[in-house]
Amino acid sequence: MKQLLPFLFLALVSLGPLIAQEHSDAEAIAYLERLNAKSADYQTLAFDFELRIRNTASALDLSQKGSVKMKGNRFFMEMGEVVLIAEEEALYTIRPKDCEAIINDRQEEEFGQNLLHLFSIDIDQHLHRLVEETTLDGKAVVIIQSFPKHVEKSSYVSITWTIDRDTMEPYLLSIRGRDGTLQDYNIQNLVVNPPLADSLFKFVSSAFPCMEEIVDLREN
């Protein structure tokens, strides 16, 4: 688990950029506009996920299941033996079994630190290609690849979206980092706009009675 977290919550490092087309497919843009429009109505979200991280060059292949509750850009995540609480400006990584917590500044431009990136995309900052419309696991889906226009400034070189065409919600995402690492997300049991208390997204040390060490790595 300690191996998994850096790949999920830190920026990915470098491989030469993939060759992307110079112009976006109009159909791909139309689908992504619908995806963005749908996500604009999300006030809160709750979902389960399966995450697989792999890199053939380094023989890396890790899998983890988890659950997330989100409100705006804040989230509460449980993944294995780790709890993550993202407040507005701080990210808490809590290991209740080890009685420890680490606090970092949130870097929301990094993919893993703002989970809203799983449900929308800055269309103008990417080139997009419609791969296919097909059926997967009994769902009618569309598969789209997105490439950042300024890959040298990005932590990833491509995102492959598999979107449920009936709900216009992401079903699978595959994010290729600049070192060739793939992060594959399978989003399950998505509930839109459930009631979630603000207190869920606030770290309170008394909620973890055994907490012996809190390491604050924030710059300020």
Image (cartoon, grey):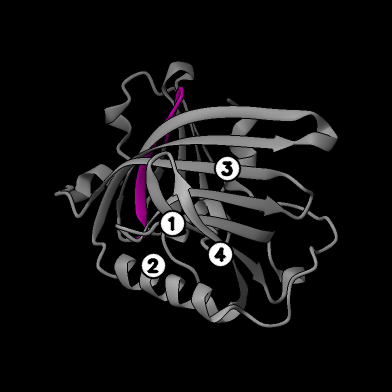
Q: What number is the disc on residue 35?
A: 2
| Magenta part, dominant SS | strand
Tell me the CA gap for discs 4 and 1.
23 Å
Which portion, as a residue range, is magenta? 73-83
The amino acid on which the numbered mark 2 sits, given as a three-letter code, is Leu
Instruction: Provide the residue designation for mark 4.
Output: 109
Instruction: Provide the residue designation for mark 1.
Output: 163
Q: Earlier in the sequence, mark 3 or mark 2?
A: 2
Instruction: Provide the residue designation for mark 3.
Output: 184
Q: Is residue 76 magenta?
A: yes
Look at discs 3 and 4 and give the one toward the viewer: 3
* 3 to 144, vertically: above or below: above
Tell me the CA gap for discs 3 and 4.
19 Å
Q: Position of 142 compared to 196: left or right?
A: right
SS at circle 4: loop
Disc 4, disc 1: CB below 8 Å?
Answer: no
Q: What number is the disc on residue 178?
A: none
Residue 75 visible within the image: yes
